[in-house]
Image: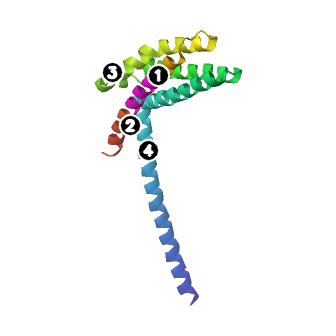
Amino acid sequence: MKPRVLRLFHWILIGAILISLGAGTQLGQSLVRQGRLIEHTYHQGSWGAAQTDSEALKLALAVERFRRTGSTADRQALAVQRELYLSRILFLRDSAEASRIRTIPELQDDLSSLIGTAATIDAGISSLLDGTAADGDALASLIAAERGKARNMTQFLLLQDSALLNR
């Protein structure tokens, strides 16, 4: 009786090992596919577009918070957020990772607008921070418009990445 139970246990153990190996192989293949998508996304500059969209939203919130409170902490937060936003614009404009998105015709208008208005946004925030801004509403509207362009770029690039993953 014992050898029979041992043989049964032996086959159950072998089956469990084979199932584990199969599941591990599937997981490995999935991780490789995801890794390729992440690499493709990074090299296409999608990361930069998504980060620009995110930082534009945070910048709009920081502007509104500072306009509402005028506190020193909010002033500092706005100054930091401005630097983050501008660094993302510079990434899109100058980085090797984003060089391919600079050549996509569908993105040219939005990208040119983001790059072209960065100096205007920077000057508007400087005026807001030093108290010489005449109209914070115009700055908020400009940031919202540019965020829409960054969002359009992000959606376009993510659709391209999704098509790559699913082919």
* Position of the N terminus by quadrant: bottom right
* Position of the C terminus by quadrant: top left
For disc 1, the marked residue is 141
Q: Position of residue 56 (x, y in %)?
A: 50, 26
Whether 10 is drawn above or below 46: the answer is below
**Magenta-highlighted residues:** 143-154
First along the sequence among labels 1 and 4: 4
Q: Position of residue 142 (x, y in %)?
A: 46, 20
First along the sequence among labels 3 and 1: 3
Q: Which-is-in-front pick, marks 2 and 4? A: 2
Quadrant for residue 154, please give it.
Answer: top left
Residue 104, visible in the rendered structure: yes
**Three-letter code for the amino acid on which mark 3 is drawn:** Gln
First along the sequence among labels 1 and 2: 1
Left or right, residue 43 beside residue 105:
right
For disc 3, the marked residue is 108
For disc 2, the marked residue is 158
Q: Secondary structure at mark 1?
A: helix
First along the sequence among labels 3 and 4: 4
Separation (CA) of disc 1 from disc 2: 26 Å
For disc 4, the marked residue is 34
**Three-letter code for the amino acid on which mark 4 is drawn:** Gln
Q: Which-is-in-front pick, marks 1 and 2? A: 1
Which residue corresponds to the image point at 51% horizontal and 19% vertical from the top-left? 137
Whether 32 is drawn above or below 15: the answer is above
Left or right, residue 148 beside residue 109:
right
